[in-house]
Image: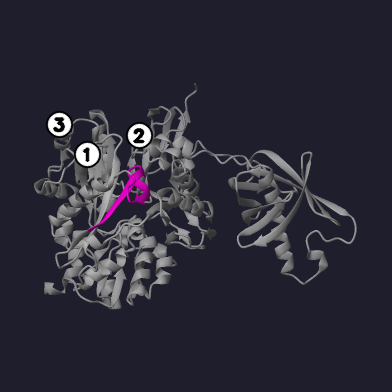
Amino acid sequence: MDRSNLYRRFRTLLIANRGEIACRVIRTARAMGLRTVAVYSEADRDAMHVALADEAVLLGPARARDSYLNVERLIEAARKTGAEAVHPGYGFLSENAEFAHACLEAGLVFVGPTAGMMTAMGSKSGSKALMEKAGVPLVPGYHGEAQDEATLAKAANQIGFPILVKASAGGGGRGMRIVRSAAELGPAIVSAKREAKAAFGDDRMLIEKYVDNPRHIEVQIIGDSHGNLLSLFERECTLQRRHQKVIEEAPSPTLNAAQRETVCAAARKAAGAVNYVGAGTIEFVSDGKDVFFIEMNTRLQVEHPVTELITGIDLVEWQLRVAFGEALPLRQDEIRLNGHAVEARVYAENPTKNFMPSVGKISTWRLPAETGGLRIDAGYREGDSVSPYYDAMLAKMIAWAPTRDVAIERLNRGLEDSDVRGIVTNIPFLSALITHQKVRANAIDTGFIERELAVLTQATPAPGELELCAAVAAIVNDERQAAQAEANSPWQTFGWMPVGRRQRSFAFRVGHGVGHGPEQKITLNYGSGPSTLVIGERELAFAIAPRDGGFDLTLDGVKSQVAAVIDGHELYLRTRHGRFDLHWVDPFGGETEEQAGADKIAAPLPGTVVAVLAEEGATLEKGAPILTLEVMKMEQTLRAPYAGVLTSIKCKVGDIVQEGVELAVVEPSGE
């Protein structure tokens, strides 16, 4: 193989990924005049990245191992389309040395480091040994090759609890467990290995001393094939949940100028140990005094936009120019830090139900315009379907401003002005998080979200006078617009009557379906003269002015913007008080309360049974684990809803189960 072609000019780029990052890479590649090729699974036939690319190739079935993780099919897709280079994005095969080597052997430029660099730095255990030799400070831990339980247990006892069991090839919090006692170690290793094997095809583990109340700081680096290696400042990624980053910002508000230079110099030293080429990230953990190297990610990071916004550098463009064989366009002393940027990851998940992934069709997708320092990197559109097979991230919202406080305000306004329906998202949770007093004060650590979860997932307040009036206005506005689509008639103009007044009564309940709680009633008076709404003893004059995504509601002389979505008798409203789901009670009656089904042990989403944790006939306490499902690459454990006897298990390990299928039966105890 002629290795002189490792970096060379190319015209056609295949993006070996999906979702937001595939769309992100396609946009920059096309702006540089490159032809783009997307790949997709059967579940992603109509996905946004497929529509954006110049060409697209079907890889195979929905499961990642049969499509996005299939190296042979990816190489064949490049051959069929004449692609000369491959960008791996992040996740999937982005840090897989075998894939990088396969691209080289196939004569393709791999937009990233070489397989050798990836092997040296992509392995958490291997990179730690290399950093130790290079003099980069490390967290105490075990990074050896022996993987038997006895060796890992001995290492854990020597390091001292609490420890972190961590997938050597992992990322994104997968294959990672905090262990606080020797008794917890065995089950944690088994579970982490299983999750790592499913996510990365590699179940090797390392063990580290767990740093209580840590901060997570990382440095963006990039190198070229001419020996130039730069750091592009650092990011603070401390706000995490289950080791998965939620909010990222740049620069770190924790570091002063001297500390910033120290950690960036350490990052350059770490990457320089392998003469690194391409974009990468050196990750550190801080205990408040010292900073320790924990790993290197040999790829582009999810949170790279915050670095782009404070430096003015398009990292994907620089990745491609490095792959062309060009030298980096700036020197270290020419890179300037400007302002502050904050990013929030928008996920299809329900924070009020333990962040359970949400799947389904996106019926409404309204995000604000990218103006005033706001940037949105999305991988979905209205009408797209969110499947259970892949990571649940829908988009990233990023805000830049001269100061951190203003950047947070801009990001929060962007989140507050977003309406996504058909699935459940974490948008309200993100808004509550970034406006939390301690987050604004930077008084946080990686355990902050878990400690504050009850506050961050508080229920929406009950709808008030404004929301009930807005509900009536939404229905009237919808009916009026429908009438205006028909033949022109004065009778279709809301409120117009030659003489007299009319009344119309409405009733609403909170929530979806038939809702819950008492009915809340409101009366509309209309006809000759101003229209009014009556709630209890109060009568309020009101008017409606339609606009995109909703209407302006003037209520007793005060105009408010209202976002609204109506689906039959289900109403979604966003007012200045927040987001509200209301059910319009059928005026003709016939509605009945549905059974909650909270005690049914059923699959919450489509998934794969990966472990059965109890035996039929076993007596269980409330909350005892029964089985584990893998859903969207994350494990979900189903537990006994009450104390009782496990009378039946209706599945086995390896079964693929659909949403709502009953998997086990517990007969409650007679107590």
Residue stretch rendered in magenta on the structure: 231-253
Residue 397 in which image quadrant: bottom left
| Main SS class of the magenta portion in the image | strand
Q: Amino acid at mark 3?
A: Gln
The residue lying furthest to the right in this view is 499
Q: Which residue is mark 3?
A: 158
To which quarter of the image does residue 302 belong?
bottom left
Residue underneath mark 2: 614
Name the kind of residue labelled 1 in the image.
Answer: Asp
Give the residue pinned by disc 1: 290
Label 2 to label 3: alpha-carbon separation = 32 Å
Q: Secondary structure at mark 1?
A: loop
Q: Quadrant of residue 15?
A: bottom left
Instruction: Determine the residue located farthest toward the left in the rendered image.
Output: 133
Mark 2–mark 1 Cα distance, whole angstroms, equals: 44 Å
Is residue 43 rendered to the left or right of residue 124? right
Q: Nearer the viewer, mark 2 or mark 3?
A: 3
User: Percent from the top left, x then y, of residue 505?
Assistant: 78, 47
In the image, what residue occupies the spot 15% across and 53% down?
Answer: 269
